[in-house]
Amino acid sequence: MNGFRIFSIARNDGLWKIAESMMNRRAAIALALGTGVGAIQGCRREEKLSATKEDQKMAPPKQEREGQNLVPVKVDPSLEIRTIAGLRPFRSPGFLVKREERNGKILIHNYGHGGGGMTLSWGSSELAARLAGDISGKECAVVGGGVMGLSTARLLQLRGAKVTLYSKALPPHTTSNVAGAQWWPFSVFDDHRRTPEFGAQYVEAANISYRYFQGLVGPKWGVRWLPNYYLSDDAPVNGWIAGPGGVLHDLQVGFHDFGPGEHVFPAAYARRFHTMMIEPATYLAELLGEIQEAGGRIVVRDFAAGEEVLGLPEGIIFNCTGLGAGALFGDTELVPIKGQLSFLIPQPAVDYNLLTSLTYMFPRSDGILLGGSYEKGKWDTVPDEAIRRQILGSHQRLFDGMREIQRSLRPS
């Protein structure tokens, strides 16, 4: 009986005598209570359960992976609401902030920011405004109604200038309105053309803008903080700009690198940091409104040549014409970079940015923005159907993979 020797019980003078008992105390008590073998086995099962619970207490808890609670984007062509294309004004040596004198006028250039126009707008415009010196009470012209022209105009007003804004188009019909508008100075210059002078200009403009945008966070301006995740199959590389040792690393708040098995994204590595997202439709309308409320004059006008710009009545002129500066002032370094975007119906639960070397996703109130094209030297703004399918397909595979990894981590 369960490894114990059989024992005999004899009655002597009304007393029970236990002979040759080899049972443990628990078995004897069980027999005396009349519970028998079942009780012994039950006790053993109880011991086993207790041991299992102790093992569970001692085992390290399962670590939660980064992004485990993020909501994957639902990517489906049926959810697409629009596809657009825009042109970035790119200069290989970097954006131009320069003062010159022509025809008795002070002409200050501020253009060519590539993919960092929205990001660098306040900083680059601040550098341009400084070149004008004391402008309090003076008449200034700003040519160009994109984010750079609007930012420049507003800063000139804050210095006491009387500003007239000349532009062939105003928000929402400008290139700035189709910007992705993640705060990060991306695709601004070619590294092999970077000079020490431009490097200092770039860093100063980025830091000024970074501080300025922080004061605009909130629904009024359409600016908010979000985490960014950059995915890669190889370990992230730290360059001149980003990562430990980079000139803008201090602006990568909450920076952390996650390796294989530490996150839920379908790539080996994920680099995270927090930055600001700007809603162009909200932001540009608010900025234009402030300029008008402060007495800024708006003139809708196109310019065919630089002489027409220099013929304006104002003595100080700011050239913020973006790609238009090439034809107006003969800048042969200025080239377009065509970028195409597809928007899905808004998905408010998505509250993070996700980027790879080929694609990017930004959640905005007007829709989920999906991007991933970079065509240098392309001037047309007609969306390409093949690129549209590529952008949608790449993101669909990406978020399906993320969803599958999250599903595998849930308790069965």
Image: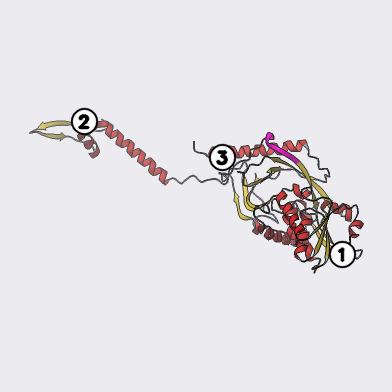
| Residue 166 as seen in the image, left or right of residue 262 | right
- Colour setup of the view: secondary structure
- In the rendered structure, the answer to whether residue 57 lies left or right of residue 254 reads left
Q: What's the mark number on residue 315?
A: 1
Q: Which mark is residue 6?
A: 2
Q: Earlier in the sequence, mark 3 or mark 2?
A: 2
Callout 3 amino acid: Gln
Q: Is residue 328 magenta?
A: no
Q: Position of residue 325 (x, y in %)?
A: 85, 54
Going by the numbered disc 1, the residue's amino acid type is Gly
Q: CA distance from mark 3 to mark 2?
A: 57 Å
Identify the amino acid type marked 2: Ile
Q: Which residue is mark 3?
A: 406
Q: Nearer the viewer, residue 91 or 121?
A: 121
Residue 159: give x, y in percent of width and height.
Answer: 76, 66
Q: Could you say which is closer to the camera, residue 406 or residue 314?
A: 314
